[in-house]
């Protein structure tokens, strides 16, 4: 009843003042209305013009000062010509704004006539400075209303205390906001012994710090607080989380900015000012950020601002505005726009929660588990070595015992062409001719080389070998291939001297080392600059993190995604050890034994191991600050690895005519350049050009593989092929080598499907599509090699079968986690955050980290598969090993 009487009295005074001012003859005088009896949570209506201003001081109970004041001013009569100016001041800060608030939107100019602002809480309960001890004169807002309007403007003003201003851990806060009504809250890291904010206890703590007298209840609360705090400190700092994650959800697509600011005044709560303090990020339906107590010792303010337009959260791709008619048949549209729900009032709903992240102890457990997983490969490697040594010792003892008994006879030469007689046949291999055909796909017939009947293959190269590396002794022999029984064997294509092959192979290692060094150092410099810029600017839109599972540690904002690349480095080093061990065993063989089996290119194998290590380093560098500008760092050595593996497969049966290192890396440079152009400008015409290049390359490689590397594109090839098709269509299209032809046909169909999918999707993430093309062809070529071995009745060792099974199992399993994307740099940062997910493994790793673990293991198993797949041919003469 007293409040109601006071309101009536205030309205009466306002009305009398208005009447008096209207009757005042001197219109140039400015009348100030000052009153310090205004109360919280009571709406007031006043009238303002150029001669009438109001100075309104709001007071309340001391308990009201524990939370900040929020001032709401509304007026439907203020206009753009004569706006209403509002100034709210406190002891340590001044805020000002005007009505109406004008906002430029896609539909035109929109104005807001209702504005709310939260005043900075200078007497924050969690402040520890002495100025907050005198709370009687703090946080009493004084609002000044003024306007240049000649007519009276009706203004409604309402001052209230912010509810739930102090955020509790694990509690959900729901609210709405508009561009004219930003809101913010405060999260203190000191949540109390029970992780529950207790404002009375916090008041008692502050009174104790200010040397003020406590009553009995306050003293009891304070004693309980100190006991519980001391007990908590004994538990150890390793077990206490030092960071939290802010989880933000929304049910609409209106663009908003979330700002994280330190515990100080003023608090910036408009679009322009938030750039000057703390962190900020854009969001639509989901957002999040991990914050550490080292950065915000006392706590932080969470500021929510609804943007005046959605331009910063959506992206309109107008680069395809003049598409040809044909493009529409491939699913292309004139303008690619992410669908956005239009909300005329731009009222956005928010729901956010703050949860604790893991402690340092849990950091150590999760990081140690990953390290232990990869070190187990080293343990297995050591166990295998010990078992092999034990087996060799047993074998040596057995041979010694047999020698003593005189049971050992002189070994016969494993391959003596002089003791074998067979029918020789000369076959001229020419372009497009089927003279390479034979009556079957088995290797039951032996392929032998007669003296003088050998293929002349160029074994020298000024770029790969020294001048003293001569070519074959018979340098002037015919360049055609001489076969026995119509079968081309590895002996035909392994005529170069071992030193020449070794020099060529080493060039792969030196090339990949050079590329790795000159590629990695600038990348590290760039990502360090990115990290510094991220820390200094606070712009969280610079990097596409999975903000719900990005755990900072020391200087890294996303430690887990950097650390999870450890597997590439450790397994790459382990593979280098395996190759080195096998290389030493090969060196210990006799000259005769080295002429048996598949010719070894150890330099290429070393290059594969270095490429795997480099992939780990560059992927880790990319994840320091992932975005569209440095995504090629994450994929470049995946391209290198896939191409090197395909070269390794090809060289197994074509040792002398294998691609040179400089040519291979020239092709890789072209691939990376195409990937760069695709990321920067993947328009319709680029996709068509790339698809044509892709399919033509597949056609060329098909002929090369089908004709065993002896196919040449000549002017008359197409004409002869057309003539054969017109004369004998059925015979012309029927493959002579059915098994090889069917496999190549399936591979081409798969590439056509991949090409069609790429054109139809035309994603901005062209680099991933290019990686899909290379990796898919590597898998297809590997399957082709395995099937051809089986068709030629070549056995495969049991451990190679294990590597094959594990390789494809892990690859397909890891593909699920690769496709389960939690970020997407092809979208805007706000759109990418909609895919963010919480950690799913050991509270530290998400699906992309699991992809790192599994893909590194899959690549290691793949390399071992290529290393051992031909172990069954170790003691087989090369004249009995077929080329395919």
Image (cartoon, rainbow, N blue to C red):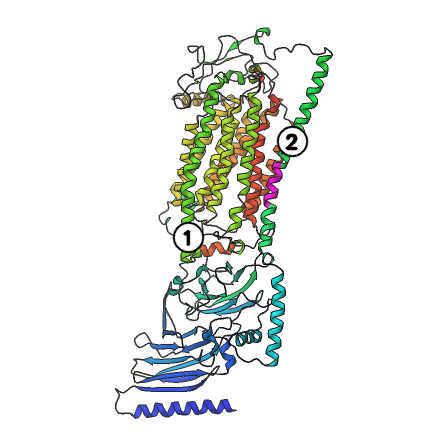
Q: Residues within 10 Å of mark 2 (few under 14, many from 20)?
A: few
Image position, residue 217 (x, y; %): 61, 79
Q: Which mark is residue 384?
A: 2
Q: Which mark is residue 532?
A: 1
Please tell me whether mark 2 sits on a helix, a strand or a loop: helix
- Is 252 part of what is drawn in magenta? no
Type of secondary structure dominating the magenta stretch: helix
Image position, residue 73 (x, y; %): 41, 78
Q: Residues within 10 Å of mark 1 (few under 14, many from 20)?
A: some
Q: Answer above or below: position of 92 versus 486.
A: below
Q: Magenta span covers which residues?
A: 370-378
- Is 374 part of what is drawn in magenta? yes
Of residue 402 and residue 67, the one placed in the foreground of this image is 402
**Residue 506 shows in this picture:** yes
Q: Residue at x 60, y 63 (%)?
A: 233
Name of the residue lying farthest toward the right: 405
């Amino acid at each position: 009843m007293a409040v109601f009487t006071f309101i009536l009295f205030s309205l009466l005074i306002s009305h009398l003042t208005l009447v008096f001012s209207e009757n005042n003859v001197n219109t140039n005088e400015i009348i100030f209305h000052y009153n310090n009896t205004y109360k919280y949570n009571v709406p007031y209506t006043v009238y303002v013009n150029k001669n009438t201003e109001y100075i309104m001081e709001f007071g309340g109970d001391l308990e009201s000062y524990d939370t900040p004041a929020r001032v709401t001013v509304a007026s439907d009569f203020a206009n753009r010509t004569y706006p209403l100016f509002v100034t709210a001041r406190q002891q340590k800060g001044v805020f000002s704004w005007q009505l109406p608030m004008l906002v430029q939107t896609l539909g035109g100019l929109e104005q807001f006539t209702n504005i709310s602002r939260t005043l900075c809480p200078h007497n924050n309960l969690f402040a520890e400075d002495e100025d907050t001890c005198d709370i009687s004169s703090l946080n009493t807002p004084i609002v000044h209303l003024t306007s240049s309007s000649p007519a009276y403007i009706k203004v409604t003003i309402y001052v209230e205390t912010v509810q739930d201003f102090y955020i509790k851990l694990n509690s959900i806060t729901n609210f709405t906001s508009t561009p004219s009504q930003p809101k913010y809250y405060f999260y203190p890291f000191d949540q109390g012994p029970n992780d529950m904010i207790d404002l009375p206890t916090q008041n008692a703590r502050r009174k104790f710090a200010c040397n003020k007298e406590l009553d009995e209840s306050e003293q009891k609360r304070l004693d309980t607080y100190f006991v519980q705090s001391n007990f908590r400190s004994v538990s150890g700092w390793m077990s206490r989380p030092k960071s939290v994650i802010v989880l933000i959800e929304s049910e609409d697509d209106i663009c908003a900015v979330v700002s994280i600011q330190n515990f100080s005044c003023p608090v910036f709560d408009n679009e322009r000012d938030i750039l000057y303090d703390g962190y900020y990020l854009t969001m639509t339906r989901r957002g999040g950020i991990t914050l550490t107590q080292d950065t915000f010792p006392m706590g932080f303010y969470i500021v929510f601002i609804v943007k005046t337009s959605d331009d910063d959260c959506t992206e309109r791709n107008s680069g395809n505005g003049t598409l040809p008619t044909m493009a529409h048949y491939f699913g292309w549209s004139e303008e690619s726009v992410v669908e956005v729900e239009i909300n005329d009032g731009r009222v956005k709903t928010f729901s956010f929660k703050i949860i604790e992240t893991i402690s340092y102890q849990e950091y150590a457990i999760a990081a140690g588990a990953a390290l232990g997983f990869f070190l187990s490969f080293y343990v297995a490697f050591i166990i295998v070595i010990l078992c092999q040594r034990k087996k060799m010792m047993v074998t040596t003892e057995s041979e010694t015992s047999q020698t003593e008994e005189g049971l050992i006879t002189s070994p016969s030469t494993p391959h003596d062409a002089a003791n074998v007689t067979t029918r020789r046949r000369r076959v001229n291999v020419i372009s497009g001719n089927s003279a390479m055909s034979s009556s079957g796909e088995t290797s039951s017939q032996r392929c032998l080389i007669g003296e003088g009947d050998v293929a002349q293959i160029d074994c020298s190269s000024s770029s790969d070998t020294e001048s003293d590396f001569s070519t074959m002794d018979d340098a002037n022999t015919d360049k055609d291939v001489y076969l026995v029984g119509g079968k081309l064997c590895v002996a035909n294509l392994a005529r170069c001297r071992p030193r020449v092959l070794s020099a060529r192979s080493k060039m792969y290692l030196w090339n990949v080392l050079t590329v790795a060094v000159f590629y990695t150092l600038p990348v590290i410099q760039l990502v360090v600059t990115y990290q510094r810029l991220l820390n200094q600017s606070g712009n969280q839109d610079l990097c596409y993190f999975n903000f719900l599972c990005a755990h900072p540690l020391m200087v890294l904002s996303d430690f887990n995604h950097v650390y999870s690349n450890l597997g590439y480095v450790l397994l790459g080093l382990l593979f280098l050890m395996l190759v080195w061990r096998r290389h030493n065993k090969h060196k210990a063989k006799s000259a005769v034994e080295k002429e048996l089996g598949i010719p070894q290119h150890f330099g290429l194998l070393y290059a594969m191991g270095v490429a795997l290590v480099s992939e780990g380093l560059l992927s880790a560098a990319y994840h320091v600050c992932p975005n569209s500008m440095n995504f090629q760092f994450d994929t470049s050595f995946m391209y290198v690895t896939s191409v090197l593996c395909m070269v390794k497969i090809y060289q197994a049966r074509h040792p002398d005519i294998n691609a040179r290192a400089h040519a291979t890396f020239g092709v890789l440079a072209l691939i990376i350049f195409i990937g760069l152009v695709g990321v920067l400008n993947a328009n319709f015409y680029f996709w068509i050009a790339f698809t044509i290049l892709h399919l033509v390359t597949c056609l060329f490689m098909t002929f090369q593989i089908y004709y065993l590397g002896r196919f040449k594109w000549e002017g008359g090839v197409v004409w002869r092929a057309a003539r054969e098709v017109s004369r004998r269509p059925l015979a012309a299209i029927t493959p002579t080598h059915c098994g090889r032809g069917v496999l190549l046909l399936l591979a081409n169909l798969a590439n056509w499907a991949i090409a069609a999918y790429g054109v139809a999707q035309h994603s901005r993430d062209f680099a991933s599509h290019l990686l899909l093309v290379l990796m898919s062809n590597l898998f297809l070529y590997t399957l082709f090699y395995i099937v051809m071995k089986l068709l030629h009745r070549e056995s495969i060792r049991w451990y190679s079968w294990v590597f094959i099974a594990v390789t494809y199992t892990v690859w397909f399993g890891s593909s699920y986690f690769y496709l389960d994307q939690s970020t997407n740099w092809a979208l805007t940062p706000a759109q990418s955050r909609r895919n963010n997910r919480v950690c799913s493994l050991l509270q530290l790793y998400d699906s992309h980290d699991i992809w790192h673990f599994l893909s590194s293991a899959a690549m290691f198993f793949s390399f071992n598969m290529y290393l051992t797949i031909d172990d069954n041919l170790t003691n087989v003469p090369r004249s009995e090993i077929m080329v395919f």
